[in-house]
Image: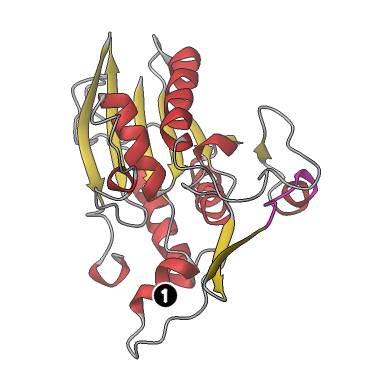
Amino acid sequence: MQLYLIRHGESTNNARWETVDGVFPPRTSDPQLTEKGIRQTEVLADFLALFKPGEEDFWRDPQNRLGFGLTHIYCSLMLRAIQTASILANRLNLPLIGLPEVHEVGGIYLESIVNDVVEISYEHGVTEAFLAANYPSLKLPTPIDTEGWWRGGKEDHNLPLKRAQGVLNWLKERHMGSEDRVAIVTHGGFFNYLLRAMLQISLEQPDNRKLEYSLIYNNCAISRFDFVGDRILLVYHNRADFLSDDLAT
């Protein structure tokens, strides 16, 4: 199979870093896309929809010059990923499946310091009722809790690597031995863990923060991996050349 990992479009939290006056707006626990993020995603959708007739060879188009031909789209259940993936799925006329397991590191939470004590507040995330009302085409492999998909609190730092390995195993069981072209809309932090699970790189580091953001990943950028026999090949990473300068974030 071919696996395409796609980071969501620019979120309101991402846009905090574009401030010019040094005052950052408040962070939110489950941010949505900005107007720029929506435009990025629309451009990405058009790029993924490109098709150029030519000799069809599953393995011999490492730059996707003939197009992408995606067959499956999955996404995190965080709002920014759902928004991004929904635009892609609609443009490509593909079903969309939500995977809670590919959420960003930490989950849906906010940290604040009160009297020198770190306090964590959280939300439960989207519900099936919310999805049915706002994203009816998104399907879930298994039901989620009626209060929302997130269990609450902040994810323990030991869990992202285990979660990444579980996602990798699930993908192999579902798609290995096929000519499926699978896209997952996920997050920058979780991508770093999933990459290491796939390529078996530095899986045991004392400080897991070193794993979390050691690779640059632009909003709406694409990384491609080819699964060939027992090998996983990194074909390219952080491809965002389809975005204009004003949309690259």
Q: How is the image coloured?
A: secondary structure
Q: Is mark 1 on a helix, strand or loop?
A: helix
The amino acid type of the residue labelled 1 equals Arg
Q: Name the residue under label 1.
A: 16
Left of 211 or right of it: where is 36? right
Q: Which residue is drawn at 38% across and 48% down?
A: 189
**Where residue 73 sits: x, y (%)?**
50, 35
Image label count: 1
Residue 204 in sight:
yes
The structure residue drawn at horizontal position 20% and vertical position 28%, both measured from the top left corner, is: 61
Read off the magenta span: 123-129
- The residue nearer to you, when weighing 78 against 156, is 156
The quadrant in which residue 119 appears is bottom right
Decide which of 46, 178 is in the foreground and name it: 178
Q: At x 69% / y 51%, what residue is drawn?
A: 126
Q: Is the magenta stretch mostly helix, strand or loop?
A: loop
